[in-house]
């Protein structure tokens, strides 16, 4: 019965593990699903979350240093060879006081004085051992910090450190979101490129076969066949390269998502749909308020940390006051009988305060304070520089996004024109009006327009993601 229960529980845990694995690694992702999944499972994102938890623990660690601290000590000592002390022999002479009286009052006429033995010599000592061979001392001490300027600064620093970790996590999430968008778009770009090149290859193979038959019948020149062979060879080479890049783009996406490199990931969104969705000129009208961006907050945190370091150096000139309360018991004996009921224990207790006043440090504290002041001035300038840089980055990102939208519209128009030109030249070629060189030129122009159109769609998606990252927008 016991083995059967173990078997059932094992099956439950295994099924739970498989269900969690399937839930954690879906087979297909939309772009929004991929972003949400990466924010939870990307390894960098998880480490940023751990940094926040670590900062919270550090904040409590700093806070706890100013709260009551209780420590207990138990010491056992066995004097294998006890220390010997030498005492003057005269200290143990019972007639020593009578001799001193005799020297002072001249009592030599008394018969008892004559019976006193001679005093020991001045260089004679008696070896004496003090204390017992074994001892146990147990005590407990309560300490409480009453005032310390650096502790107050430390509390403020711990709070700022937590804010720095939270801002770093937000910055990491924004960068991961942008990375997912870029990786997702690259996969879609490679998929669309493969599909287009395969269609172009089929069309070229058809044209080449028809041209060969015409050539075999003596109705065209061999150069026409060779021109189409050159074009087909170039398309086949590009197709093989794009397929290799497609595999790499899937691997890059998996890494960004935080899953296995070779996971069979499927995407549900299309490049065209995402490009259309990301054409939102209204974002260009967003006010350039850099104070709300995470980069500005990170620079502000750096300035605040430098201010706290300055306060810390100044606080080192303040006195430190702490109190303590201690109590304990001590037991002694020549043998180990400390657990016997007859063992005597002697208690002790004390309390007190300690005041430490820094007086003179040979201007060390002054130099440290001045250095902290210099670092603060540098941080303030860095904050102003960051503000200016962010304003420039926002303006540049808006310009890039506007350009991406315009190039997308141009590329879409050029693609339609290139398709019509290629079809006209194809008809003219088979009617004998256009040469193979003109047909190849039209085909090359079409293939270039196709890639430009795909790249324009990807640029719209990526440039909008770049602008949203700088503006701290995730919608």
Image (cartoon, rainbow, N blue to C red):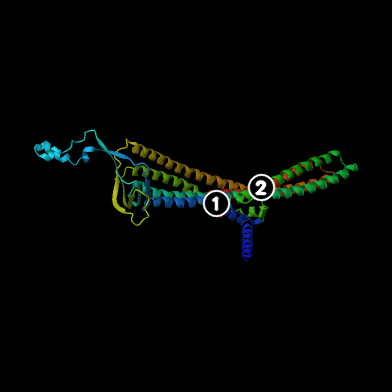
Q: Which residue has dot 2 on it?
A: 249
Q: Secondary structure at mark 1?
A: helix
Seen from the viewer's position, the closer of residues 1 and 298 is 1
Q: Secondary structure at mark 2?
A: helix
Q: Which residue has dot 1 on it?
A: 46
Seen from the viewer's position, the closer of residues 3 and 419 is 3
Q: Quadrant of the N terminus?
A: bottom right
Q: Residues within 10 Å of mark 1 (few under 14, many from 20)?
A: some
Residue 88: image location, x then y, percent? 23, 37
- Residue at 38% x, 43% y: name it: 80
Q: Quadrant of the C terminus?
A: bottom right
Seen from the viewer's position, the closer of residues 381 and 359 is 359
Q: Nearer the viewer, mark 1 or mark 2?
A: 1
- Residue at 30% x, 53% y: name it: 346
Seen from the viewer's position, the closer of residues 447 and 324 is 324
Residue 165: image location, x then y, percent? 48, 49
- Residue at 16% x, 38% y: name it: 116
- Residue at 66% x, 47% y: name it: 249
Work out whether mark 1 precedes mark 2 in sequence or the reverse, and give the earlier one.
1
Residue 87: image location, x then y, percent? 25, 38
């Amino acid at each position: 019965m016991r083995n059967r229960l173990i078997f059932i529980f094992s099956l439950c845990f295994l099924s739970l593990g498989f269900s969690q694995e399937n839930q954690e690694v879906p087979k297909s992702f939309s772009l929004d699903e991929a972003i949400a999944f990466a924010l939870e499972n990307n390894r960098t994102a998880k480490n940023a979350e751990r940094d926040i938890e670590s900062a919270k623990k550090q904040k409590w660690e700093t806070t706890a240093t100013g709260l009551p601290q209780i420590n207990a000590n138990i010491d056992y000592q066995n004097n294998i060879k006890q220390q010997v002390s030498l005492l003057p022999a005269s200290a143990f002479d019972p007639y020593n006081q009578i001799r001193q009286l005799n020297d002072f009052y001249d009592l030599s006429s008394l018969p008892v004085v004559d019976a006193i033995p001679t005093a020991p010599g001045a260089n004679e000592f008696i070896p004496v051992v003090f204390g017992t061979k074994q001892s146990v001392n147990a005590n407990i001490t309560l300490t409480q910090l009453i005032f310390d300027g650096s502790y107050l600064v430390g509390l403020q620093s711990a709070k700022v450190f937590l804010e720095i970790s939270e801002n770093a996590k937000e910055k990491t999430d924004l960068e991961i979101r942008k990375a997912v968008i870029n990786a997702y778009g690259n996969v879609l770009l490679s998929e669309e490129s493969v599909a287009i090149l395969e269609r172009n290859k089929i069309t070229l193979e058809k044209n080449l076969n028809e041209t060969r038959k015409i050539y075999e019948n003596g109705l065209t020149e061999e150069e026409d066949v060779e021109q189409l062979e050159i074009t087909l060879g170039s398309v086949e080479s590009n197709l093989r390269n794009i397929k290799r890049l497609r595999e790499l783009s899937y691997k890059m996406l998996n890494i960004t998502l935080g899953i296995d490199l070779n996971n069979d990931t499927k995407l549900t969104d299309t490049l065209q749909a995402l490009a259309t969705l990301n054409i939102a000129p209204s974002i260009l009208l967003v006010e350039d308020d850099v104070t709300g961006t995470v980069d500005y907050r990170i620079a502000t945190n750096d300035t605040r940390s430098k201010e706290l370091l300055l306060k810390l150096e100044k606080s080192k000139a303040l006195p430190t006051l702490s109190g303590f309360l201690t109590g304990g018991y001590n037991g002694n004996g020549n043998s180990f009988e400390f657990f016997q009921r007859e063992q005597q224990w002697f208690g002790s207790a004390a309390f007190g305060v300690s005041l430490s006043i820094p007086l003179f440090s040979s201007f060390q504290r002054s130099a440290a304070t001045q250095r902290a002041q210099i670092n603060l001035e540098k941080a303030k300038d860095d904050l102003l520089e960051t503000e200016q840089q962010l304003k420039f980055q926002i303006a540049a990102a808006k310009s890039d996004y506007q350009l991406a939208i315009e190039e997308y519209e141009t590329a879409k128009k050029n693609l339609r024109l290139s398709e019509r030109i290629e079809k006209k030249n194809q008809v003219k070629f088979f009617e004998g009006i256009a040469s193979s060189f003109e047909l190849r030129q039209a085909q090359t122009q079409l293939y270039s327009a196709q890639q430009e159109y795909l790249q324009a769609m990807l640029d719209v998606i990526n440039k909008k993601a770049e602008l949203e990252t700088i503006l701290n927008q995730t919608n």
